[in-house]
């Protein structure tokens, strides 16, 4: 069957809730990468890991050199690996996430992957802990290593999906699902469809104001999610 729709999922506060967990890794990771103590904490809000890491290093008095960024990435992955056995106790899958992923997997015309600020390895850890990786093609996603600008991740994923499936996904056939204004902008800046969920730190009104085409309170109504994504 010809693939007709590309669905790009965010992870945090969209599919899973790891509230405050990731930020606790930064103290150890920062020291491992720089030898210094972390003074200024990271800011997330739907930003890419490259953006967060770049600003974090600068705010703590370090040059954001590529070598240091890569060292911090490596240390963060090590922290995730060290803690992943606790994820089912310290985090949770959001209601309706598994059902939505399963519903789209049953539609042979849909390709599902990620556009996330997370690192690729941490993305896998977070999703696999709750069995949410089963229906996502993680090899064609756009990850937070790529750019400080989240909108850059969308065409990257589109290109990988097109190459794998032999189908050019037009912008109107691409749907970005996420919970932050940055997710909305990533869609809108690329002419894609934005489906926002008010399951994070932003209200439905704030997400609509950014230009989201549809805002859902959560993912629990699978039929509503399908309508928003498939039209």
Image (cartoon, helix red, strand yellow):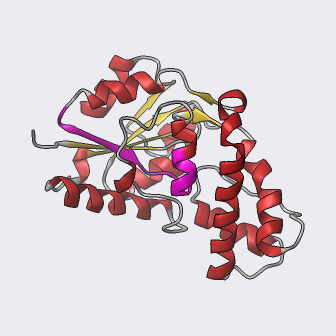
Residue 98 inside the magenta-drawn segment: no
- Which residue range is magenta in the image? 108-124
Establish if 27 lies above or below 110: below
Residue 117 appears in view = no
Q: Quadrant of residue 71?
A: bottom right
Residue 121 inside the magenta-drawn segment: yes
Residue at 66% across, 52% down: 44
Relative placement, left or right, of 91 versus 138 is right
Percent coordinates x, y for residue 202 in the rendering: 61, 37
For the N terminus, give its image quadrant: top left
Relative placement, left or right, of 162 versus 62 is left
Residue at 65% across, 65% down: 74
Residue at 38% across, 30% down: 101
Percent coordinates x, y for residue 105 in the rendering: 29, 31
Residue 108 appears in view = yes
Establish if 224 lies above or below 32: above
Residue at 18% across, 52% down: 165
Establish if 26 lies above or below 123: below
Relative placement, left or right, of 111 versus 213 is left
Establish if 26 lies above or below 12: below
For the C terminus, give its image quadrant: top left
Q: Front-most of 81 and 60?
A: 81
Q: Quadrant of residue 63?
A: bottom right
Q: Front-most of 169 and 211?
A: 169
Percent coordinates x, y for residue 197 in the rendering: 50, 32
């Amino acid at each position: 069957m010809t693939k007709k729709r590309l669905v790009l999922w965010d992870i945090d506060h969209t599919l899973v809730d790891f509230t405050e967990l990731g930020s606790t890794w930064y103290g150890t990771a920062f020291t491992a990468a720089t030898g210094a103590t972390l003074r200024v904490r990271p800011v997330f809000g739907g930003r890419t890991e490259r953006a967060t890491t770049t600003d974090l290093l600068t705010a703590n008095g370090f040059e954001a050199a590529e070598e240091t960024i890569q060292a911090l990435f490596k240390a963060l992955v090590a922290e995730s690996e060290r803690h992943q056995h606790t994820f089912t106790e310290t985090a949770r899958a959001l209601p309706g996430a598994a059902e939505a992923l399963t519903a789209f997997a049953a539609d042979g015309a849909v390709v599902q992957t990620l556009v996330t600020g997370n690192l690729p390895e941490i993305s896998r850890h977070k999703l696999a802990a709750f069995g949410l990786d089963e229906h996502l093609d993680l090899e064609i996603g756009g990850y937070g290593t790529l750019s400080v600008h989240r909108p850059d991740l969308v065409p990257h994923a589109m290109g990988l999906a097109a190459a794998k499936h032999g189908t050019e996904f037009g912008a109107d056939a691409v749907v970005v699902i996420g919970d932050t204004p940055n997710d909305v902008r990533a869609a809108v800046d690329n002419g894609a469809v934005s489906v926002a969920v008010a399951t994070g730190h932003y209200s439905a009104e704030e997400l609509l104001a950014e230009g989201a085409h549809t805002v859902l309170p959560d993912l629990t109504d699978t039929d509503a999610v399908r309508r928003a994504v498939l039209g």
